[in-house]
Amino acid sequence: MSDTLETDFLVVGAGAMGLAFADEVMRRSRRLRVTLVDRRAGPGGHWNDAYDFVRLHQPAAFYGVNSARLGSGGEDLASKPEILAYFRRVIDRWSATGRLRFMPQCEVGEDGAVRALVGQRTWTVAATRRRVDATFSRVQVPATHPPKYAIDPDATVVPVGGLWRLDRPHPRYVIIGAGKTGLDALLYLLDRGVGPERLTWIVSRDSWLFDRATLQPPVAGTHIMAQLLTVAEARDPADAFARLEEHGWWQRIDETRDPTMFRCATVSRDELAQLRRLKHIVRLGRVQRVEPDRLILDGGEHPVERGALFVDCTADGLQRLPPTPVFTPERITLQPVFVCQQVMSAAAIAAIALRPGDDEGRNALTAPVPHPDTPGDYLRCLSTTADNLLSWLSVPWLTWWTGRNRLSAAAHLPLLRRVALVRGLRAFAGTRRDRMKALVEG
Ligand SMILES: Cc1cc2nc3c(=O)[nH]c(=O)nc-3n(C[C@H](O)[C@H](O)[C@H](O)COP(=O)(O)OP(=O)(O)OC[C@H]3O[C@@H](n4cnc5c(N)ncnc54)[C@H](O)[C@@H]3O)c2cc1C
């Protein structure tokens, strides 16, 4: 039997992006209703499955939803329990108004019907405004995505979360994966007192890393602008990467290698110093098979002592996905419209969705900025972010919103520096923007 539900927005997915969207709708209106549906039992999306010691990689000061602060400010990186409790409070607060209906352990099918995963009920949803797809990110975490390589039954392989439950030492820890999860696993083991000589790190691609100090409030608010000006002066992409490093935004573990990966992974200078203590880094491509005493990789074999613990950190957390228009007649598809700032993007899309206008105009303000995978992708992401910001500048309420919204790093700047930022952006439009476009497209 199917009941009918009436709502204004049907938001599919109660992860960080769905919540940031729903919150902005609730915050900006006193009457609009939102129905938020998720397969999971609670809000927070991938954070529910993440390893227990995960923290935000970037400051909590501009993470979460617009209406509620997260963390203690400054450089604080909220932990998984803090993030999940925060999202629960957000849901409870808005539910109490009677305008938000949260439907956990329910699924929205392609037909738009909501089905309870536990129990037999189904609902037909009449959304007077639109359906919002907040599932586009397809986040993968090691706990839910088994590795793609083969594993000998006698080898001991655990997902990264297994480190939290270890109760005996291993002669060697082999960390498979060179993304942020791999870095977290290495830093966790070093912090627990495992000597760097007992760690082996499998690196299929070296990565550029953001320096966290440059992403903290208040300086974070200026870094995109400063990077745009820097990149616009570069001769070619390689020169742009060198300048990003020279100015301290980018860093790398091994300064003799040219990284081929950039996915907005962020570490502090102290963490970088810890990672530079590692003695065994294996660069033989991707792992094909794990055996108790060796690894078989694309580029050859690597021997490992028996009793080693292999730690899988290979899930493709945030993938680079082909973009799709944000606004179509059937739905709104939440995607980043600002490089590596998913929650700020989702809130901006909500704010734009509520203003009068047509979808052509709304899409002109929200060109998707797919998550970068390579250093070259990052330059393209910067360029599209600049295009979006410049179009926002022509819409006074949106400029105001960006400067006042806690999810925007710019909002954490003192007023005069915010004004300077707007002036800087206007100065960037024109020759510098053209130079940047030529650089990323050439
Ligand atoms: C390890 C990690 C650390 C991060 N750290 C930061 C950070 O420090 N700062 C920052 O700004 N960003 C960070 N991010 C990225 C960002 O915060 C978001 O986490 C990212 O955008 C993913 O959130 P999401 O809501 O898009 O997706 P998800 O978290 O995957 O949520 C999507 C939800 O949709 C549900 N769903 C899917 N299909 C259906 C369906 N048919 N019916 C009902 N429900 C469905 C799923 O159950 C899921 O709960 C991080 C990401 C990761 C992976």
Image (cartoon, grey):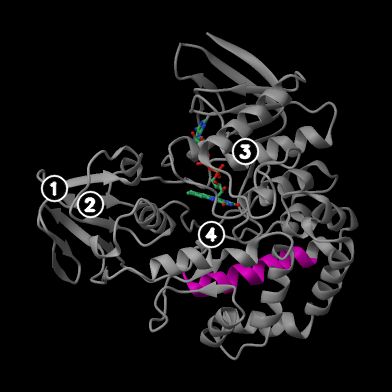
Which of disc 3 and disc 4 is earlier in sequence? 3
Confirm whether the magenta stretch covers residue 109.
no
Q: Residues within 10 Å of mark 2 (few under 14, many from 20)?
A: many
Which of disc 4 and disc 2 is earlier in sequence? 2
Amino acid at dot 2: Phe
Which of disc 2 and disc 3 is earlier in sequence? 3
* Above or below: residue 340 compared with residue 359: below
Q: Residues within 10 Å of mark 4 (few under 14, many from 20)?
A: many
Asked which secondary structure carries label 2, the reply is strand
Q: What's the CA distance linking mark 2 and mark 4?
A: 28 Å
Q: Residues within 10 Å of mark 1 (few under 14, many from 20)?
A: some
Q: Are marks 3 and 2 in contact (CB under 8 Å)?
A: no
Q: Is mark 4 within 8 Å of ligand 1?
A: no
Residue 306 screen position, x and y as percent:
10, 53
Which of disc 2 and disc 1 is earlier in sequence? 1
Q: Are marks 4 and 3 in contact (CB under 8 Å)?
A: no
Q: What's the CA distance linking mark 3 and mark 1?
A: 39 Å
- Which label belongs to residue 310? 2
Asked which secondary structure carries label 1, the reply is loop
- Which label belongs to residue 155? 1
Select label 3 or label 2 by which is in front. Answer: 2
Q: Is mark 3 within 8 Å of ligand 1?
A: yes
* Above or below: residue 284 compared with residue 18: below
Question: Would you say residue 116 is visible in this rendering?
Answer: yes
Query: Is the stretch drawn in magenta largely helix, strand or loop?
Result: helix
Badge 3 is on which residue? Answer: 18
Q: Are marks 1 and 2 in contact (CB under 8 Å)?
A: yes
**Residue found at the very far front of the displayed protein:** 193
Badge 4 is on which residue? Answer: 371
Q: Which residue is at a point 88% across and 61% down the rendered structure image?
A: 415
